[in-house]
Image: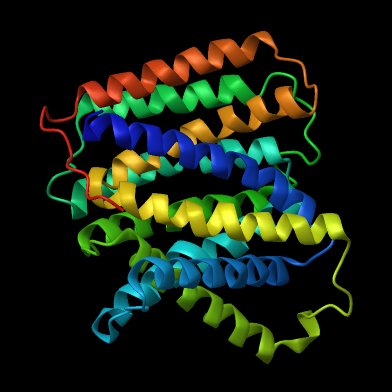
Amino acid sequence: MNAYTINWVLLLLLSAIWGGAFTLNKFALQAYNPEILVTGRLLVAAIVLIILVLIFFKKVEIKASDWKYYLFMSVVGIVAPFLLISYGQIGIDSSLAGILMSTMPISTLILSHFFLDDEKMTKMKLIGFIIAFIGIVILIMPGKATLEISLIDGLYSEFMVISGAVLYSFAAVYGKRYKITNPLNASTGVTLYSAIIMTIYLALNSNLIPTGFGSISHISAVLTLGIFCTAIATIIYFQILQSSGATFISMMNYLIPIWAILFGVIFFDEIALWNYFLGLLVVIFGIQLSQNSRNTQKPKTTPI
């Protein structure tokens, strides 16, 4: 299996993990405010990552000279978008949130064109991304004509979700420019910084801390978000980012809604409608079109 194929397998795995995260996030928000939810999953993830680093490398190596990188990636790539998306999901339907998050590949494509020398925009790549976005709309919108809150009434929530998507784009581009060769160390440093930032924030705003811990189900949701959707997913994210680039990894936002719908069909007995298959075909066509515009040189993979 060549490096390009491995990166696609990792991208599918990452999008599957984060496809389930939206549902878990929505469920956990029934018991916790966004600040508690974000802090909880980050603390769990930081503990898991530190344990993994100690197992594989015997010690945690987070260079002091890289503090600007860790701070930027923590604030712009994790803390701010986590909070924005969590608050946004309170006010809008999860399906609409999925569509809004699918704007990330286009914003990443634009930013990469100006800030990354090896990821310039091409006409076919832009057309492919737009077609894939249309596929997401086809995939989600039919049957969702009556959203919980109308587009106008949910404008503030929509703005927060889109802002989170744009911040993810900035983080992806910056993360690609700043070379951190070991994905495990990079994910540990960024997650640890993020957990510290949120812990300090909660300490300064103790009124946000609840008196109870929630039900077992809600606690399990936070643990799952921390272990799989944050710790494991962040390692995979940095691996793909360094080997294939910001534009490539941004395509996971076209795949996440597909996984979310698939999980609904498998685990919640939801009915697969005609638009699921049509939308999936359009997304695949758009992604294939954008990938045909890539340079013939395949990305090299650095082992985790």
Above or below, comparing residue 22 to residue 293 in the picture: below
Q: How many marks?
A: 0
Image quadrant where residue 120 sits: top left
Image quadrant where residue 301 sits: top left
Q: Is residue 183 visible?
A: yes
Q: Residue 69 at x, y = what percent?
A: 31, 73
272 with respect to 288 (left or right): right
Above or below, comparing residue 299 to residue 190 in the picture: above
127 with respect to 39 (left or right): left
Q: Is residue 30 visible?
A: no
Q: How is the image coloured?
A: rainbow
For the point 26% across and 46% down, which residue is it?
245
For the point 28% across and 62% down, which residue is it?
182
Q: Residue 196 at x, y = what percent?
A: 53, 82
54 with respect to 79 (left or right): left
Q: Residue 298 at x, y = what percent?
A: 15, 33
Above or below, comparing residue 9 to residue 240 in the picture: above
Q: Residue 136 at x, y = what percent?
A: 54, 26
For the point 70% across and 12% down, which residue is it?
273
Quarter of the image with the N terminus is top left
Please tell me which residue lies in front, 53 or 241.
Answer: 53
